[in-house]
Amino acid sequence: MKKKAAILLMSALAVMAVPMGAMAAENGQEQQISVTLTAEPKYTVTIPASVSMGNEGTYVDVTASDVENLPEGKKISVTIAGTDKYRDQMIVEAETSPRTSLRYQIISDDGELIETNASTGAVGVGKEVVSFDGNETKQYQIKPVIAGRYEYGVAYTGSITFGIELADVE
């Protein structure tokens, strides 16, 4: 009885194997496989947490380090993402009564003047301040626009937020 069960099982397996082999041969489909491995870009961008400036402004160092796997035709772009003021205006304010404010401007590492101005519609958001294609330190200049009503000897404060992303090299 055991012998008959074993023969029956072997026959069933053989029958199941034949149609599958015939099916594969009939379809004749072949698939080529190719794999291209890409490593994710890695980098660290260091921007000072605070900056102090006088009447003439100051230069600010921004550093890209640990740059790896930067794709060809791409750069690390540091742009203005926004400010803490209404409509992302680039202004600093003093705790005076009445409140006084100063506009400021940034001169990017490639010499572009970036400023905001409600009356002219100039905006800073999205403008590139510095860019990198490797490990390096670059500078931008930030300076106050001394015009209108202002006071000497008081602290003007505000904040700016930067965006950091990969962008196409122009």
Image (cartoon, rainbow, N blue to C red):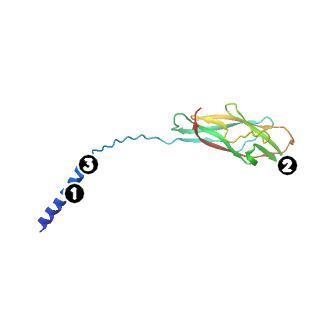
- Corner quadrant of residue 44: top right
Q: Which mark is residue 50?
A: none
**Number of other residues with Cα within 10 Å of mark 2, as a class: few under 14, some 14 to 19, many 20 or more:** few
Give the mark toward the camera: 3 or 2: 3
Q: How many angstroms separate mark 3 from mark 2 (CA)?
A: 82 Å
Q: Which residue is mark 1?
A: 16
Looking at the image, residue 30 sits to the left or right of residue 101; the answer is left
Identified at 80% across, 46% down, the residue is: 93
Q: Who comes first in sequence, dot 2 or dot 1?
A: 1
x%, y% of residue 137? 63, 35
Whether tag 3 and tag 1 are in contact, CB under 8 A, the answer is no
Where 25 sits versus 110, above or below?
Answer: below
> Could you say which quadrant of the image residue 122 lies in?
top right
Q: Is residue 58 above or below residue 14?
A: above
Amino acid under label 3? Ala
Q: Give percent across and percent down for residue 94.
A: 82, 47
Q: Nearer the viewer, residue 125 or 83?
A: 125
| Left or right for 99, reference 61 | right
Q: Are marks 3 and 2 in contact (CB under 8 Å)?
A: no
Residue 157 visible: yes
Pointer 3 residue: 24
Identify the disc placed on residue 99. 2
Of residues 168 and 155, which is closer to you in this image?
168
Residue 53 locus on image (x, y percent): 77, 39
Q: CA distance from mark 2 to mark 1?
A: 88 Å
Q: Give the amino acid type for the residue marked by disc 2 in the picture.
A: Arg
